[in-house]
């Protein structure tokens, strides 16, 4: 197995194509295997699906050092993507989203449902996500320790592309919370400085929707990727709108998202 494995779920739509193109874009910078995954409802679909997968693979212009394999499994995407990623030890799942439209606004986007089922980091792209060099990665953090779990993964992307990291948090009116936020920022800043990754820090104004302030930041600054650790205390986390609004952002910026583990099991 390749040391670097990207898993790309493909549903034979334009967003599946977008995910594959972005995987190839990343693959130009690291020698990697891309595993194209399709989940079928029944075994009767296997032969037809295999032919479609072969056609997609044959039409790709592969960068040097990149290979594509295919995998077809029967079942539900909400179970199989996470299971395959874990079994194959994928470093990253690159997936397209159709966005939170129609009934998905009420039921939670499919992307969020899949993300909350997996331990592997996701990179979510949209149909019209631009394929361009990554010069800056936006890393929003908050007062939870869980939010810090994304910083190493974001740092890896920044290192691969020689990108700058923008770390943002929210200003806090309470003195104790303000100090906690400054401590969080300092932890992240020091980690990136230790890795010699260019880093800028900004505290966004307090009050209002944090996701809206993050998206406003992307309008005012050059941001080529958003990277977040997703954590929720909700019994149905796919209903939360914070991460969903970021992965379906209007600028179609790719969003790296890690379903974080409880901070009680970790040390920072």
Image: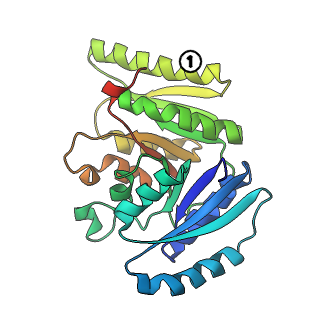
Q: Position of residue 53 (x, y in %)?
A: 59, 77
Report the residue at 51% width, 77% height from top: 12
Q: Residue at x 36, y 36 (%)?
A: 261
Q: Secondary structure at mark 1?
A: helix
Answer with the quarter of the image where residue 23 lies: bottom right
In the image, taking residue 83 as reference, residue 24 lies left or right, namely right
Few, some or many residues within 10 Å of mark 1 (<14, 14–19, 20+): few
Q: Quadrant of the C terminus?
A: top left
Query: Pointer 1: what residue?
Result: 190
Residue 212 lies, in percent from the top left, at 36, 45
The answer to whether residue 131 is seen in the rendering is: no
The vertical placement of 10 against 183, above or below, is below
> What residue is drawn where x is 49% and y is 18%?
187
Using the rendered image of the protein, determine whether residue 206 is visible from the camera's viewpoint.
yes
Height in image: 211 above or below 21?
Answer: above
Please name the residue shown 35% across and 16% down the image: 180
């Amino acid at each position: 197995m390749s040391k670097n494995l990207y898993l790309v779920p493909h549903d034979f739509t334009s967003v599946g194509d977008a995910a594959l193109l972005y995987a190839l874009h990343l693959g130009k910078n690291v020698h990697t295997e891309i595993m194209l995954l399709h989940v079928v409802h029944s075994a009767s679909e296997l032969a037809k699906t295999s032919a479609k997968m072969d056609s997609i693979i044959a039409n790709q212009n592969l960068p040097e050092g990149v290979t594509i394999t295919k995998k077809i499994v029967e079942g539900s995407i909400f179970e199989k993507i996470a299971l395959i990623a874990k079994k194959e030890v994928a470093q990253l799942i690159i997936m397209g989203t159709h966005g939170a439209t129609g009934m998905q606004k009420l039921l939670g986007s499919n992307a969020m449902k899949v993300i909350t089922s997996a331990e592997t980091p996701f990179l979510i792209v949209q149909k019209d996500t631009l394929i361009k060099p990554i010069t800056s990665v936006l890393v929003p953090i908050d007062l939870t320790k869980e939010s810090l779990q994304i910083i190493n993964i974001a740092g890896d992307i920044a290192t691969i592309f020689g990108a700058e990291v923008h770390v943002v948090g929210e200003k806090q009116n309470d003195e104790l919370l303000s100090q906690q936020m400054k401590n969080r920022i300092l932890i992240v800043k020091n980690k990136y400085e230790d890795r010699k990754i260019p880093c800028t820090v900004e505290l966004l104004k307090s009050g209002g929707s944090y996701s809206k302030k993050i998206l406003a930041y992307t309008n005012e600054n050059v941001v080529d990727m958003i990277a977040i650790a997703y954590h929720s205390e909700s019994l149905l986390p796919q209903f939360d709108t914070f991460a969903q609004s970021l992965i379906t952002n209007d600028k179609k910026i790719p969003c790296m998202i890690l379903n974080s583990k409880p901070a009680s099991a970790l040390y920072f």
